[in-house]
Image (cartoon, grey):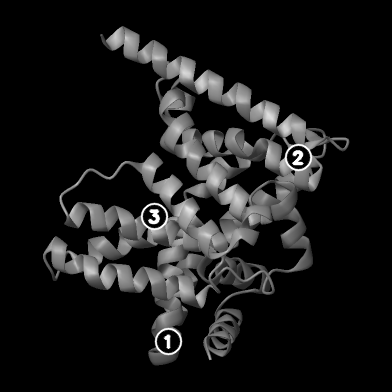
């Protein structure tokens, strides 16, 4: 039934927007790869932006922030947490329970539960606990690329982004760029080992399009809802969203044609990836140790 509902909503997007923009919106809102055209899918893959379009943990974070702001207008925070968690899991349901969405939904639920109980929510502990819960339920997830990418990118935001933001370089201090750069560093071995290529322009492309996602996700969900009840209003909102979606498509396709910095990597063993993470972990430990010494 939910698959049928998602299919109908994707058709409605197709009626409201041109093909590529409708596919982009379906991907961001519902995590649907089927709605993406072949050329757009390849462009997203080549520029390292596919993770933005197919429903990801970032979508859950943005959605929960949007919903909390909306629910706070009508309820006290503690009361608003109940419908918020329900809506988060409903979103996970309609996206097909993809591993990144499940991971983010569990983390969000545990974070809000900790806040409800008045206890500090430490992201690193919640991430580890979430991983253990998911692997206990489905051990086969350990070999899932989307599972690996989701956890690595989240770990990057927790451990690497704070270090990057302390840089004196204003570009690195930028929230969107530091988010993108931290995630790219954390997922680099997984991308290379599984896809055999890496585009060094990927952090730049992510930076250029990442700001559009909250708007596309929020308005996309509203448009999906209104397409059932008030189609003319949905069409009006689609006109407003179209320039943003078009910008996203243009940027991704433009950079996908720049091949000079696309780096193809020969087959590397698992040991290379493990070595990378050992060095990265040592660097993070040393940086944190240095910061703690300076504070004392």
Q: Residue 107 carries which label?
A: 3
Q: Residues within 10 Å of mark 1 (few under 14, many from 20)?
A: few
Q: Which of marks 2 and 1 is in front?
A: 2
Marks 3 and 2, the one that precedes in the sequence: 3
Frontmost residue, 34 versus 236: 34
Q: What is the CA distance from the residue labelled 3 to the residue labelled 2?
A: 27 Å
Residue 38 lies in quadrant: bottom right
Marks 1 and 3, the one that precedes in the sequence: 3
Report the residue marked by disc 2: 192
Is there CB contact under 8 Å for labels 1 and 3? Answer: no
Left or right of residue 271, residue 127 in this image = left
Frontmost residue, 291 versus 161: 291
Q: Which mark is residue 232?
A: 1
**Above-or-below relation of 68 to 255:** below
Task: State the image coordinates of residue 260 (x, y, percent, origin top left).
Answer: 82, 33
Element under label 3?
helix
Q: Which mark is residue 268?
A: none
Frontmost residue, 283 versus 71: 283
Identify the residue shown where x is 32% and y is 56%.
Answer: 110
Q: Which of marks 3 and 2 is in front?
A: 3
């Amino acid at each position: 039934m939910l698959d049928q509902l998602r299919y109908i909503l994707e058709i409605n997007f197709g009626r409201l927007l041109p093909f590529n923009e409708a596919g982009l919106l379906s991907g961001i809102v519902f995590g649907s790869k089927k709605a993406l055209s072949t050329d757009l899918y390849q462009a997203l893959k080549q520029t390292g932006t596919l993770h933005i379009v197919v429903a990801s943990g970032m979508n859950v974070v943005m959605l929960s922030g949007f919903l909390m702001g909306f629910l706070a207008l009508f309820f006290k925070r503690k009361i608003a947490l109940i419908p918020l968690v329900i809506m988060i899991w409903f979103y996970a349901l309609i996206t097909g329970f993809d591993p990144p969405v499940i991971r983010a939904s569990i983390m969000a639920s545990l974070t809000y539960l900790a806040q409800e109980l008045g206890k500090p929510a430490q992201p690193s502990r919640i991430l580890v606990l979430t991983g253990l819960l998911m692997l206990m339920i489905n051990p086969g997830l350990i070999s899932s690329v989307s599972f690996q990418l989701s956890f690595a990118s989240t770990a990057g935001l927790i451990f690497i982004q704070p270090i990057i933001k302390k840089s004196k370089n204003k570009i690195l201090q930028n929230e969107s760029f530091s988010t993108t750069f931290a995630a790219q560093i954390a997922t680099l071995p997984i991308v290379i080992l599984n896809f055999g290529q890496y585009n060094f322009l990927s952090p730049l492309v992510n930076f250029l399009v990442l700001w559009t996602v909250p708007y596309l996700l929020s308005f996309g969900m509203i448009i999906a809802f209104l397409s059932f009840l008030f189609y003319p209003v949905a069409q009006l909102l689609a006109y407003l969203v179209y320039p943003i979606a078009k910008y996203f498509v243009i940027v991704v396709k433009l950079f996908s044609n720049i091949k000079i910095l696309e780096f193809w990597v020969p087959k590397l063993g698992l040991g290379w990836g493990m070595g990378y993470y050992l060095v990265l972990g040592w660097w993070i430990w040393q940086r944190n140790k240095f910061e703690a010494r300076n504070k004392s």
